[in-house]
Image: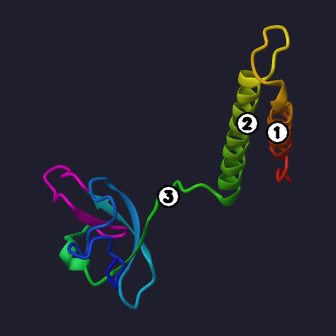
Amino acid sequence: MTNNNWSDPARPGVPMNPEQSGWHCIQEPGEDPEFAFWRSKPFLGECRGCWEMKGTEDDFEPHEISNWRYLRPCSLDDPTPAEVDARVKDARRVALEEAARRLEELHHQHKYNPETGEGSEHDTGYYRALSEGAAAIRALKGEGDD
């Protein structure tokens, strides 16, 4: 990043993911940060690859704001902290269940079967550990859900 934080030093004034239209937070020197809309495609004959500033009808070319500071891409629909927390917890539950399922799958694939003689009865401690590992992982799924 440049000293003004633009993602491509060769293209100051152009945001991250310039091929996608969307909202970004930028800051004019000495001013408060503001939302600006990056338009990647022309709209009704207007410019392509330019900024629409909130509260003005003017469009700005990248070179016109190259001395501004780029803060981050954003969305007016950014999730709340509670929504992010819920998504993280859901993803954690899914990942833990997948890990437990995989351990059980390994346990059942290699478990000693005295009827068929498949597997190794010498590895029962290993396979018991797989089964216990799956149970321990499932127990973690509920932790941290306060």
- Judge whether 7 appears above or below 132 on screen: below
> Which residue is pictured at 82% across the width and 15% down the height?
113
Asked if labels 3 and 2 touch by Cβ distance under 8 angstroms, the answer is: no
Which residue in the rendered view is the most extreme toward the bottom? 30
The residue under label 2 is 97
For the point 70% across and 54% down, the residue is 85
Residue 73: image quadrant is bottom left
Q: Are the residues at dot 3 and dot 1 in contact (C-beta closer than 8 Å)?
A: no
Amino acid type at mark 2 = Glu
Please tell me how crowded label 1 is: few (under 14), some (14-19), or many (20+) other residues with Cα within 10 Å: some
Q: What residue does disc 1 label? A: 138
Q: Secondary structure at mark 2?
A: helix
Q: Which quarter of the rendering shows the N terminus?
A: bottom left
Q: Earlier in the sequence, mark 3 or mark 1?
A: 3
* Residue type at the position of mark 3: Leu
Task: Say whether disc 2 or disc 3 marks the residue closer to the N-terminus.
Answer: 3
Would residue 52 be counted in the magenta stretch? yes
Q: Residue 63: image x %, image y %?
A: 19, 76
**Residue 118 vs residue 12, the one in the foreground:** 118
Whether 80 is among the magenta residues is: no
Residue at the spot 20% in from the left edge and 74% down from the top edge: 10
The magenta stretch is: 40-56
